[in-house]
Amino acid sequence: MITRYGSNTAKMADEPLHSYDGLDIGAWANQDPKGVARGLVAAANQGDPLALRWVRRLVKHRVTDSLLADVDRIVRGDLWSAFLILEPSSRKFVWRLRPRRDSLQDREKMFGWMVAWLVTVDAIDGLKRCALKDCRKYFVGGPRAKWCSENCGSKYRIRKKRKLDRERQMLC
């Protein structure tokens, strides 16, 4: 693949981005917003303080001017790659940005780039928090998703049914 770097010199792209400290950031190379979002969510659920801070902000407040200013402060001046991809839905070529490897050596910059990319491709709506009070994990789901897994959904429904059964028994 041919990419154009910030210096406007064309080069062959190096191999796709691989995992960094256990996170799969190769999703950038594949242009997979859900993959990048899942990587950010997985880091947050594993207790990474930076990832947790970003995910909490995104889930609670979505995209705000303050969030955009913080992302801009973190990624400003970093090296990036711009490359053309064929967008399957529109069948048109579009430019996409991706951080260069040397910009990902700092965890704060890596998470800043992840958030910047998710905001750019409008993939924030899929970030959610599990509705089960015992769980409260973050996850990437569809518009109607409430639980991070089928297991959590089943627990919720079973608890709700048992509560209704107890209430009915008390009325009898």
Image (cartoon, rainbow, N blue to C red):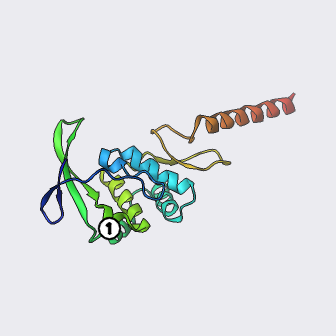
Amino acid on which the number 1 mark rests in the picture: Val
Q: Quadrant of the C terminus?
A: top right
Establish if 6 lies above or below 94: below
Residue under the point 58% across and 50% down: 137
Q: Which residue is mark 1?
A: 75
Q: Is residue 31 visible?
A: no
Farthest top residue in view: 172
Left/right placement of residue 102 relative to residue 111 reads left
Whole-percent x and y of residue 86? 19, 40
Whole-percent x and y of residue 44? 53, 56
Number of labelled discs?
A: 1
Q: Viewer-proximal residue, 121 or 102?
A: 102
Q: Is residue 113 visible?
A: yes
Whole-percent x and y of residue 113? 35, 61
Whole-percent x and y of residue 78? 28, 68
Q: Of helix, strand and loop, which one carries label 1? A: helix
Q: Viewer-proximal residue, 115 or 65?
A: 115
Farthest left residue in view: 9
Left/right placement of residue 92 relative to residue 149 reads left
Residue under the point 55% across and 40% down: 146
Residue under the point 50% across and 63% down: 53
Q: Count residues near mark 1 (Cα–Cα under 10 Å), then give few for <14, some for 14-19, many for 20+.
A: some
Residue under the point 33% across and 55% down: 117
